[in-house]
Image (spheres, rainbow, N blue to C red):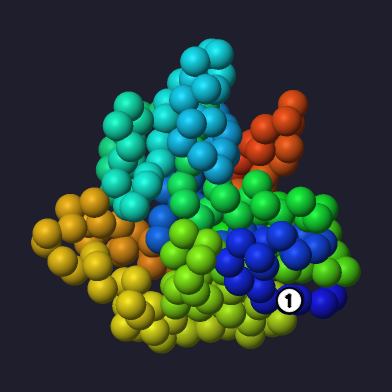
Amino acid sequence: MEIRIESLIAGAQEAEGVVVVIDVFRCFTTEAVAFANGAKEIILVAEIEEAFELQRVGVGDVLMGEVGGKRPEGFDFGNSPFELKDVDLTGKTIIQSTRAGTVGVTAASNADVIYGGSFAVADATVTNILSTKPEIVTLVAMGWEGRIRADEDEQCALYLRNTMQGRKPNHDAVRSLVISGEESQKYEIPTYPQWPIEDREMALDINSHPFALVIKKEDGYFVSRPENIVNNRSL
């Protein structure tokens, strides 16, 4: 099995095989919480306007996402796992638009299979990918808005690669590296309420959710759903 690590939108466009689009802060951490709270499926779109149009034609129940870290006007929720923590989403179809994770998914046109990647679902993702014995796995660290590399996504890519290769990364060491990174610092600034410190804590709770996030194209839409761990393989 060949494991490649790519970055940003260009990396998503070039990715092949089983592709993991990684967005730790916060797209695929927020998705994990949404599914844990009962969401049925999440439709991923690149642009805010696409989300509104889907809602207009009756597709989806809830709008969730962000621009510049903030909930767009007219959306039900921001891109915040902490905001969703106690929200009952049972049976809901969510439409999600972010500036990195959802954009990366829509850019991965050469992928055979797409997974949403974050620390929250890391080992479950590895387990399910290994169960299919793929020839190529591409891990795409999306970074800040798909344009600037960010430590949390690059570290998550390394974590996934090491775990796939049979090594067991030290969770505390990984968290420490991420917390020292530039993107992590904004969660400590009180004047940035769109980035609550609780979001960072939830994003760095490694393996907090026992499922992967598999994304498939259905009727022209990219749809994310939780995928249970295959064969309960122990990592």
- Residue 195 in view, yes or no: yes
User: Would residue 76 be found to the left or right of residue 44 on screen?
Assistant: left
Farthest left residue in view: 190
Q: How many marks?
A: 1
Instruction: Relative to 170, say whether 38 is above or below.
Output: above
Q: Which quadrant is home to the N terminus? A: bottom right
Q: Position of residue 170 (x, y in %)?
A: 47, 84
Q: Which quadrant is home to the C terminus? A: bottom right
User: Would residue 18 be found to the left or right of residue 162 on screen?
Assistant: right
- Residue 232 in view, yes or no: no
Q: Position of residue 87 (x, y in %)?
A: 32, 33
Q: Residue 58, located in which quarter of the rendered image?
A: top right
Q: Which of 72 and 126 lies nearest the eye of the viewer?
A: 72
Q: Residue 84, located in which quarter of the rendered image?
A: top left
Seen at 32% across and 83% down, the residue is 180
Which residue corresponds to mark 1? 4
Seen at 76% across and 51% down, the residue is 109
Q: Which of 12 and 30 lies nearest the eye of the viewer?
A: 12
Seen at 69% across and 82% down, the residue is 166
Mark 1 is on which residue type? Arg
